[in-house]
Image: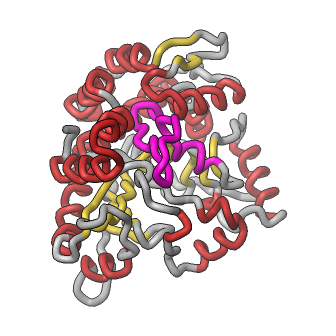
Amino acid sequence: MDLPFAPSRRSTVGLEWELQLVDADSGDLRQAATAVLDGVALPGGRGHPNVHPELLLNTVEVVSGVSESVGQAGADLARAVTDLRAVTDPLRIELVGAGTHPFARPAFQKVTNQDRYATLMDRTRWWGRQMLLYGVHVHVGIEDRAKVLPIIGALLTRFAHLQALASSSPFWAGEDTGYASNRAMMFQQLPTAGIPYQFGRWADLEHFVGDMTRTGVIDSFDELRWDIRPSPRLGTIEVRVCDASPTLRETVALSALTHCLVEHYSTMLDRGLELPTVPRWFAVENKWRAARYGMEAILILDDAGEEELVGETVSRMLTELAPVAERLGCVEELADVAAIVDGGASYQRQLAVAGGSGLDGVVESLVREMRAGHPL
C-alpha cells in the first residue's frame, strides 16, 4: 500500500489539548460540546479554527496553527481558551485539563454524532465506552521521510519520561487507582492504540498498513492511535503519550521537551550518528512503570538495560537539550520542565488535595489551576 508522506518545514510545531467541560456547580462533566462549539463558531456558520469536537460531548479540543515555536503555539491555545470562556462562563461551565475526571462515570457520557465515532463504539463496545480520557498531542514537522521511523524509535527511549511528567489521571470513576496515569492503561485497551511497532523501512510500515486495511482492522491511517505515530498527511511525527495537563504552562513545557527531543534526534541523523533504541519489551515495561509510579518510576534507559529514576534522567536531558532549545526559541518553556520535577506532577498535586478535601476538592483545584495557567 502506497503511504505518501508530505514533508513539512523542519521542526515546525503544532499542539492539541483536549479539555473537559465541567459543571461549575456540581463539578461533574457537562455534555455541552455542541452548544459550546456553536457558540464559538465564526460568522457564516464556520467552525472556530482552533476549537474542535472530540469523541465525547463533554470534551472540546483546542489546537494551534503550524507554529515556529511552542511559545507561538501556546499563544494560539491561550487565545482559543479565551474565546471558549466567552461562551462557557455564561453557561456556568468550567474548562479543566487532566487525563481523567476524578469521579465522572463513563456510562453516563454521550458520544459525538459522527460516523467514525459510531463505528469505533460499535467495534470496541465496553472498552470503547471507557474512553473517558484526555490527552495532549504534539506534532513536529519532519522535512525528510527517511528520518521519521528512526526518530520514532529514538523517542521510544524517552517517551515514558514524558508520560511520567505529564501524569494527571490517578482517579477513575471516583476511585484512587494507585496509578499516576490510569489514562495510559485505559487507552491502550483499544485494538490499535498503545506503543507503536518499530519498522526498519517505510515500506515495512506501508505493508503493515496495507494488511490492516485489507483485513478491516482500520479504514484509514488515523485509526492507528499509537502513543507516537507518523502523520503522513501533515508531514509530522505526532507524540500522543501525554495526559492532558491542567495548565497552559505545563502543556507548553512538556511540548517544548518533546519538540527539543525530535530536533535533537534529527540533528544526530544529519551528523551521521546512530540513534538510540530499546527493544519493544523494554518500551512496554517503561510505559507500565511510568503509568504506575509516575515521577517515582525507575525507567530502563537503553538496550543494555541501564536504569535510572525519572527525575534524574530528565534533569540530565534538560542540560543536554539546552543548545537545542536555544535554536528552537524555547529556553524558558523548557526550563519549566524542571519545575515539574521539583514541584510535583499533576497526579501528585491531585492526590495531596484529595487527602484533605476529597474528590470535589480535586475538581476545584483543577479549575483554579486552569484559570491561573500554572500549577498552584
Residue span colored magenta: 162-188
Q: Is residue 113 above or below residue 302?
A: below
Residue at the image point whose x is 76% and y is 62% from the top: 217
Instruction: Kindly identify the residue that appears in the image at 34 percent across and 45 percent down.
Output: 245
One can see residue 26 in this view: yes
The N terminus sits in image quarter: bottom right
Q: Nearer the viewer, residue 351 or 84?
A: 351
How many marks overall?
0
Q: Position of residue 147 (x, y in %)?
A: 56, 36
Q: Outermost residue, bottom direction?
A: 44
- Tell me the quarter of the picture where residue 280 sits: top right
| Residue in the foreground of this view, choosing between 55 and 330 | 55
Q: Residue at x 46, y 67 (%)?
A: 54
Q: Nearer the viewer, residue 195 or 166?
A: 166
- Quarter of the image that includes the C terminus: top left
Residue 282 is one of the magenta-drawn residues: no
How are the residues colored?
secondary structure
> Do we see residue 73 in this rendering?
no
| Position of residue 36 in the picture relative to residue 127 (left or right) | left
Position of residue 106 in the picture relative to residue 77 (left or right): right
Is residue 166 in the magenta section?
yes
Residue 123 picture location, percent across and down: 72, 68
Q: Residue at x 57, y 40 (%)?
A: 148
Percent across and percent down for residue 10 are: 40, 42
Residue 273 placement (x, y as % from top left) = 55, 18
Q: In the image, is residue 354 above or below residue 27?
A: above
